[in-house]
Image: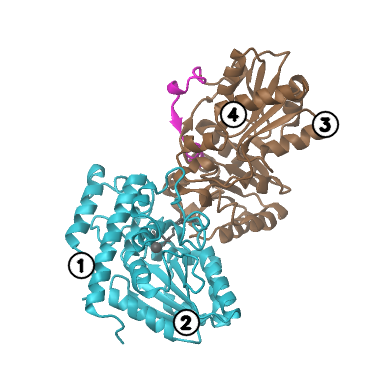
Chain colours: A cyan, B brown
Amino acid sequence: MNYVDDKKVIELELKANDIRQSIIEMLVSAGSGHSAGPLGMADVFTALYFHLLKHDPKNPALVDRDFVVLSNGHICPVQYATLAHAGYFPVEELKTLRKFGSRLQGHPHRTKLPGIETSSGPLGSGIAQAVGMAIALRMDKKTNFVYGLVSDGEQDCGIAWEAAMLAGREQLWNLIAIMDRNNIQIDGFTEDIMPLEPLRAKYEAFGWHVIDVDGHNMAEIVNAVEEAKAIYEKPKMIIAHTIPGKGVDFMERRFEWHGNPPGKGPIDKVPADRQAEEALRELRTLNGKIRSEHE
Amino acid sequence: MIFKNAQLHEDSLDIAKLEQKPTRAGFGEGLVEAGDKDPSIVALCADLTESTMILPFKKKYPARFVEIGVAEQNMAGVASGMSAIGKLPVISSYAMFSPGRNWEQIRTTICYNEQPVIIVGSHAGVSVGPDGATHQAVEDMAIMRVLPNMTVVSPCDMVEAKKAILAAAVLRKPLYLRLHREKSPIFTTLATPFEIGKAEIFFDSDASACDVAIIATGPLVHNALLAAGELEKLGKKVRVINCHTIKPLDEKTILDAARMARHIVTVEEHQVAGGLGSAVAELVAREYPVPIEFVGVQNRFGESGDKNELIEYFGMGVSHIVSAAQKVMNRSNQ
Ligand SMILES: Cc1ncc(C[n+]2csc(CCOP(=O)(O)OP(=O)(O)O)c2C)c(N)n1
Ligand SMILES: [Mg+2]
C-alpha cells in the first residue's frame, strides 16, 4: 500500500538534505559530537516531523501530540536540526550546539529545549520511558502514538529487552519503535562486537510486529509507519536499515565516524582540514537525491 | 611552599611549564605493566575500549580481554564470576555507566562477595565537557564510598594514575579508580610517594603552624596548590593535602592537619554531598570538630561547555578555593 505520492517524497528528500547540511554545520561549529548516526537517521526524522507526526512546533506541549522519545541520545544533532527546520526554534541556534549556556546540550535535556520529551544519552533507558508513556496513555484512553527511537548498539543493554518484554505482554499497539540499524557501534561493527541477529525473530518472539525498511527510502519509511499505526494488537518495531554517515562518502559505513565531527575524524580519505567543506560539497551536489541503495 | 618530601615537579606552580596529559592515559600505561607482572589480570570493556585506554592492554593481551558490549550491569556480574575463578578483572567504562548504572551488581556481586575487581570509571566530573550532564559523573565517589569492602582512589595526575593502577593490582580488593577525560597538568614525579590509603602533604608553609588546610583530590589538587600559593602571598600559612584515597581515609594525616590548622577546605570535582568533603567532615566531626568549607559541585547537574569554563562556572577554580579558605578562616573569628 502506498501512502505517499512522488511530489511529497521529493519534498521530503530535499528537506532531509537541508537537515543533513545543518548537521554538518552544527558539528563543525561545536568541534565535537557524533556524525555517523545523525546523518544516517536524517531521512527517518524528516519523514516523522514533516509528514507523519501529530505535533505543533508552535505549541510543543500540545496535549494530543505524538510523543517522540530519542533513546540513543548521542544522535541528537539530527533531532535538533529537524526540530529547528520544523519551526520549534530558530535554525540559527543550531550553531550553539554543545556550547556553554546553550539549550542544545551535548545530549538532549528535557527541560531546556522545546520538543524534547526526555533527557537521554545513557543508552537503553529511552525505550523504557516510551513503554511507560504508552501504558499511561492507554490507561487514559488516549489515541496518540509514542515513537521510540532506538539504536542497534543499544540492543546490547539488558534494559532494552526488559522493556521489549513488557511492551509485548502489554500488547502496546500505541508504541512504534524505530531502530537505527546501521551495523556500527563504538568499538566496531555490531555483529563483531555483540551479534544482534536475528533481530527480527527476536522481537517477534517478544510479541512485537516487525517491519524492515530501507531507512533512506522516504516512501518505504512512510508506508511502514502507516502500516504500524494500523496494526492494533502488538507493539511495532520498524527496523530502519541505514547507512551510518549517509550522504558523505568518506564517512559512510565506518564505525570510526561514530563520535567525531567533520575535521576530527579519520584522515585516510580526506584530510582533517578539508572534511567540513568536502562533506557540505557532497551534500549540496546530491540535491536531495538520497534514495534506496536497492533501487 | 611546596613540601619537599612530596618531590613534585620543580615547576609545579607554573602551569605553562607543565606537560598536560589526562589521568586515563596513565591508567592505560599502568594496566599494561600490571598485566606484564600478573597474568591473572584480565580486562573487560563495554564498547569504549579506545577512550577508556584499555586498547593497549587489549592489543598486547587479546586473549585476556573480553568485549562485553554496551552492558555495564552484565560486565560487573561477569567480572565477579571471573574473580571467583582466580582472575583479577579490570572493568572499564565511563564513570556515569560504571559504577553509575551497575551499582547494585557492584555492591552485591563484588563487595558483598569480597571478590577483587577493579572498577575503572573514566570521564568523571564536569570536565568531560561538551557531552553535558548525562555524561558528567559527579556522584560516583559517593556511591562507591558507602560500600563496605570498597576502596576508592582518585589520582591527581597522569603519573599518579599509573601508580594507582599498579598498586591496585597488588592490593587485590574491590577498588574504584576514578579517572578524567581531559588533559591536566602533570605535577607529581616518579619520586612522589604514593601508597593507597595514605594522603600526602604537597604544600606546607610552616611545619609547626598553619592557618588553613586544603584537602583535595583528583586533578583539582593542582588548583589547590595554586590557591595555596596565592594565600601564602597574602601572609597565610597553608597546608595542601593530596587525598587520593577517599576510602579508607588517612585519618592521621587529616586529623593532624585539623588540629594544627583548625580550618579546613575540601576540594573535589564531585557533588559536595557524599564525596571527599563528606568523608573529611564525618571524621573531623567525630574526632576534632573544626569549620569546613566545601569546594565542589553544589547539588546541581552539569552542563555542556569546555573544561575550564565548567570548572569556573561550578565554583572549583583557584579563586573559589582562595575565597573558601578566607571564608573558613573568618568563621572561627566570629
Ligand atoms: C549505558 C551506556 N553505556 C555506554 C555509553 C557510551 N556509548 C555512547 S554511543 C555508544 C555506542 C552505541 O551504539 P549505536 O547507538 O548503535 O551507535 P551509532 O550507530 O550511532 O554509532 C556507546 C557505547 C552510553 N551512552 N550509555
Ligand atoms: Mg549503531
Q: As rendered, which of B112 and A36 lies closer to the eye?
A: A36
Marks 1/3 same chain: no
Quick one: quadrant of the N terminus of chain A?
Answer: bottom left
Label 4 chain ID: B
Please give the label number shown on residue B287.
Answer: 3
**Percent of width and height locating residue A235:** 49, 80
Q: Amino acid at mark 4?
A: His
Residue drawn at the location 53% of the way across and 42% of the way down: B126
Q: Secondary structure at mark 4?
A: helix
How far apart marks 1 and 3 lie (CA) works out to 73 Å
**Percent of width and height locating residue B254:** 73, 28
Q: Residues within 10 Å of mark 2 (few under 14, many from 20)?
A: some
Marks 2/4 same chain: no
Label 3 chain ID: B
Q: Which residue is mark 2?
A: A204
Callout in the foreground (2, 1): 1
State whether residue A261 appears in this view: no
Q: Secondary structure at mark 2?
A: helix
Residue drawn at the location 58% of the way across and 36% of the way down: B164
Q: Is residue B143 left or right of residue B164?
A: right
Label 1 chain ID: A
Q: Who comes first in sequence, dot 2 or dot 1?
A: 2
Which residues are the magenta region?
B10-31
How far apart marks 1 and 4 lie (CA) works out to 55 Å
